[in-house]
Image (spheres, rainbow, N blue to C red):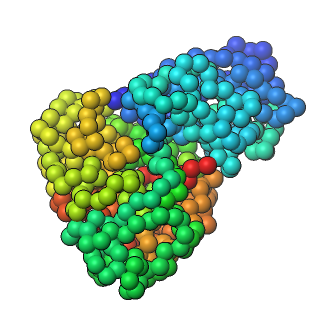
Amino acid sequence: MGGRAKVNMWARMGDNKPVKIKQQRCNWLLLLWVICFLFSILCLSLPINTAEANNLAVSAVSVESVSLGQTTAKVQFDISWDNSWRTSINYDAAWVFIKYSTNAGVSWNHATLKAGGTNPAGFSGGSGTALDIIIPADKKGAFLRRSAFGSGNVSASSIQFVWDYGTDGVIGTSTVRVKVFAIEMVYIPVGSFYIGSGGSETAAFYTYPTTTNPYLISSESAITVGTSSGNLYYPSTTYGGDQSGPIPEDFPKGYAAFYIMKYEVSQGQYADFLNTLTSTQASARYPNNNGNYRHTISGSYPNYSASRPDRACNYLSWADLCAYADWAALRPFTELEFEKAARGPSVPTPNEYVWGNTNITQAVTISGTEDGTETITTTGANCNYGSATFSGGDAGQGPLRCGIFATGSSTRISSGGSYYGVMELSGNLWERPVSVGNSTGRVFTGLHGDGVLSGSGYADVTNWPGSDATGGGSRGGVWIADASYVRTSDRYFAANTNSGRSTSLGARAARTSP
């Protein structure tokens, strides 16, 4: 797993003057600081060093051509990551998007790509590992995936995206700074699945009237909730929800295909997110909890950094989660999608964890300096739960590095991974889905962010639960909770409204498949 990256950035061009490159340090796992260019210059290629973490690396970014007539520019880059796969069931992917600034980095905007679809004209998957480029209709980014079935490491060079800078209102003679971001995702395919396990989990879903029968979701049609035979239902508890419905047709249920972040948002990712906001926005989104429960983000705008950038980021409020998702052109996921991503199409095992059985081993011992290469040496450990006080590494209590249980030879059980290969859905930090147990949550329609926040730093997407967190909830357990909360179908806090920042709260986002 990668550590902190050093990147050359701010290459500026103009009027036949020599290009000067200024050195700075970048601490985000998935960030590539790119180049500045003057649109009147058609072509310049500048090498930079690699930015990496969680085995994802983007490098060698350049602007290869600018068309003043078509108001487009090609952004070229290399990409690589380890342990990639594509099978007949699902695959991993990288969500890649571009930010640009026309005012020397004072503010950043989200770039719109030229075309939608798979491998559109003008875009190139480059050379090396054959990759598909999949661009959603809103053109706010693209998924990169293997073009053919296979597994192993990905390494592709000279990938080209076409930026439609005219659509974004950029003038052809502007001086522009560009940053390219990439986030590891997992594709969750279309298909039926069960919610609830038939076990003893708190407030778990079941098919009325027998609590031991899980409920089958077989379409995206509206779901009736109530006490008639065959309906979806769940027990009444303090935080489980209002037992009401229906769950509307437009609410994402997990039957349709979607992508979800492979890992929880890391501290390095979040720090560099802050650095692309305005000072007002960053002030609203800064957790300001450095040194508490293994949180390491410190500094001041626009130079926030994390001393442990690969560690999952705690102290994130619902407003923080939504702002990050909006900024990345993603969206929150729902608690039904949570169970789909965890269980897949398998028939549930009562009281199971996301790795498919009822066995769990607590992580206690950290081996190595926590620089992104640390491992857990507790025999058989596959989950961070139960308020463990770690020995080794930085010690203490709190979240661990994203994907820490996975190795090149680990199994689903030993890695703590889900059916589809999503990591840390059980334990580490609470997952924060949109709840079906609240009327505000049920009006969520799965709209994506557009990359732009409000001036005060909040997400502003229609029908997302607001900053008061009404309509949001928590699933999957957390490092501070006992094992019962970690079970896939446990809904103890599924409709709990928690708007504040806490040592136990993290973030993860999703996107509906094009």
Please say whether residue 304 is visible from this viewpoint.
no
Q: Residue reaching furthest right?
A: 69
Q: Between residue 418 and residue 6, name the one nearer to us.
A: 418
Task: Tell me the quadrant of the picture where the N terminus can be found.
Answer: top left
Residue sitting nearer the eye, 109 or 78: 78
Which quadrant of the figure has residue 196?
bottom left
**Residue at 48% from the left image edge and 55% from the top image edge:** 191
Q: 115 or 374: nearer the eye? A: 115
Report the label total. Answer: 0
- In the image, 297 versus 136, the foreground residue is 136
The picture places residue 306, in percent across and down from the top left corner, at 37, 39
In the rendered image, the vertical position of residue 425 relative to residue 492, given as above or below: above
User: Looking at the picture, does residue 105 appear above or below residue 197?
Assistant: above
- Locate residue 165: give its quadrant: top right
Q: Residue at x 47, y 25 (%)?
A: 154
Residue 323, percent from left and from top: 52, 56
Residue 4, horizontal then vertical, whole percent: 39, 29
User: Is residue 138 at all visible to an observer of this figure?
Assistant: yes
Residue 509: give x, y in percent of width and height: 47, 52
Q: Residue furthest bottom?
A: 227
Residue in the picture at 69% in, 30% down = 123
Q: Residue at x 66, y 38 (%)?
A: 118
